[in-house]
Image: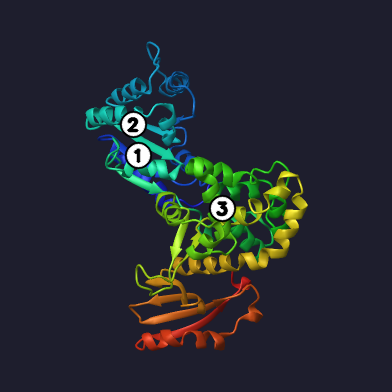
């Protein structure tokens, strides 16, 4: 699959490189695995960079590998054997005093497992040489909690050293539509929506489907639920290292959220334990769930629910982790039948999310969210506000357009009308046909 989107990120990387021609600059790129961090770096600098992947291995072996790569890229032999990353990094900083170079270190958080003192060594070397050297240093990592700790914890040596930070997000709905249009002869709305649900805009998942020609709902599902599919262990591969020993508790919570148990009280009643700390870490430390309140609700209000931000992880916890016993005995057809049975119900939330994203991309609104009253009464799928023009758009979202009832929607919005008397209201229905 060709490279898509990321125009703003490429602009930042180019601008930082230009600044590094005068003095060294450090850019940090974070984002979940498979999001496209490595491809972004390679697209920005092509072959004009030294790319180092911090694999979890002995530091001496890693330095041996890095030395060979560096010698090849610089076309210069390094005298003597370098066995510590500290010495290798210092060599590169000194070399860049004479010539500008771009160095990218991928999976940078792995130095915690290789040799944690590398971070303080790098800080000392960076501070000593950065003003007289010309290195464009890019540090990329996938373990969100560790990358956040390295660069945002004031007690860590590299705190405050980054000149730019890029948090790489999934492709937006317009980019996903562009990918489908360029790779599929006839665009079916259900296939486009399924592409959004299954990939969640994650670049690697989109690439897998495009490269294998799996661009219909049936083929995508077949690809996910086939023997030896990369998707089957994906949630575990992504999150076990983040969560550590207590991953089973976190997985149980995420599985319940994916199965529509979205309030803290519901989850605690099932697990029979206090989960406040777990929810807080999932939201603020791991960036996996989001607390959702009704639009216009006060901060700290008690009416709230939790959702999993990542579309694919939602699917994985609902259908793959949720039916892991069947998957472990190889009964993938059983799981496929369950997905086919439940997909319309499961995907309703994602259709709302899809149109919220579309409305955000329009840049017409100052606030967008969902609305409900105490006891989950008068639920409204989308409320979009334009405070300058004093307009409020009220939307109902249904897979089937025939099920949209605007009169009922007006009834649900009575309290909003009373609250915003000076605003004009527009009512609209969105369905699969509008994707």
C-alpha separation, residue under disc 2 versus residue under disc 1: 8 Å
**Residue lying at 49% horizontally and 74% vertically, measured from the top left:** 382
Mark before the other along the chain sequence, 3 or 2: 2
Estimate the x, y position of residue 123 in percent, counting from the top left: 28, 31
- The residue to which callout 1 is attached is 150
Pointer 2 with pointer 1, Cβ within 8 A: yes
The quadrant in which residue 218 appears is bottom right
Label 3 Cα crowd, 10 Å radius (few <14 / some 14-19 / many 20+): some
Q: Nearer the viewer, residue 120 or 86?
A: 120
Estimate the x, y position of residue 97 in percent, counting from the top left: 27, 26
Which residue is most to the top? Answer: 80
Mark before the other along the chain sequence, 3 or 1: 1
Q: Secondary structure at mark 3?
A: helix
C-alpha separation, residue under disc 3 versus residue under disc 2: 34 Å
Q: Secondary structure at mark 1?
A: helix
As displayed, is residue 43 above or below residue 185? Answer: above
Pointer 3 with pointer 2, Cβ within 8 A: no
Q: Is residue 387 visible?
A: yes
Q: Secondary structure at mark 2?
A: helix
- Screen quadrant of the C terminus: bottom right
As displayed, is residue 238 above or below residue 116? Answer: below
- The residue to which callout 3 is attached is 252
Mark seen at residue 186:
none
Label 1 Cα crowd, 10 Å radius (few <14 / some 14-19 / many 20+): many
Q: Is residue 323 left or right of residue 435?
A: right
- The residue to which callout 2 is attached is 119
Which residue is most to the front? Answer: 272
């Amino acid at each position: 699959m060709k490279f898509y989107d990321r125009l703003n990120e490429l602009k930042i990387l180019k601008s930082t490189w230009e600044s590094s021609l005068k003095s060294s600059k450090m850019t940090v790129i974070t984002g979940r695995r498979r999001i496209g961090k490595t491809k972004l770096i390679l697209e920005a600098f092509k072959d004009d960079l030294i790319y180092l992947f911090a694999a979890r291995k002995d530091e001496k072996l890693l330095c041996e590998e890095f030395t060979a790569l560096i010698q090849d890229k610089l076309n210069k032999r390094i005298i003597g054997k370098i066995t510590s990353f500290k010495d290798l990094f210092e060599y590169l900083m000194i070399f860049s005093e004479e010539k500008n170079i771009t160095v990218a270190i991928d999976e940078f958080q792995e130095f915690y497992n290789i040799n944690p003192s590398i971070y303080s060594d790098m800080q000392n070397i960076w501070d000593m040489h950065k003003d007289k050297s010309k290195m464009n240093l890019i540090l990329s990592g996938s373990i969100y909690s560790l990358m956040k700790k390295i660069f945002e914890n004031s007690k860590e040596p590299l705190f405050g050293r980054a000149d730019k930070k890029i948090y790489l997000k999934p492709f937006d709905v317009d980019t996903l539509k562009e990918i489908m249009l360029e790779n599929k002869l006839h665009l079916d709305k259900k296939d486009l929506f399924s592409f959004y649900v299954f990939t969640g805009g994650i670049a690697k998942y989109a690439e897998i489907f495009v490269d294998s020609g799996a661009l219909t709902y049936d083929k995508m599902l077949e690809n996910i639920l086939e023997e030896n599919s990369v998707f089957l262990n994906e949630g575990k591969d992504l999150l076990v290292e983040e969560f550590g020993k207590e991953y089973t508790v976190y997985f149980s919570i995420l599985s319940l959220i994916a199965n529509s148990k979205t309030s803290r009280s519901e989850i605690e009643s099932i697990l029979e334990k206090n989960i406040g700390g777990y929810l807080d870490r999932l939201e603020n430390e791991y960036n996996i769930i989001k607390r959702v309140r009704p639009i216009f609700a006060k901060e700290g209000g008690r009416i709230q629910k939790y959702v999993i931000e990542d579309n694919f992880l939602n699917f994985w916890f609902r259908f793959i982790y949720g039916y892991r016993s069947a998957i472990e005995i190889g009964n993938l057809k059983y799981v496929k039948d369950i997905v086919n049975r439940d997909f319309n119900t499961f995907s309703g939330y994602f259709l709302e999310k899809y149109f919220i994203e579309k409305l955000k991309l329009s840049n017409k609104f100052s606030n967008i969210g969902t609305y409900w009253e105490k006891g989950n009464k008068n639920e409204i799928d989308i409320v979009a506000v334009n405070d300058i023009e004093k307009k409020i758009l009220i939307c109902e979202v249904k897979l089937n357009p025939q099920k949209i009832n605007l009169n009922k929607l007006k009834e649900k919005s009575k309290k909003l009308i009373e609250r915003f008397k000076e605003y004009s209201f527009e009512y609209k229905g969105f369905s699969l046909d509008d994707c």
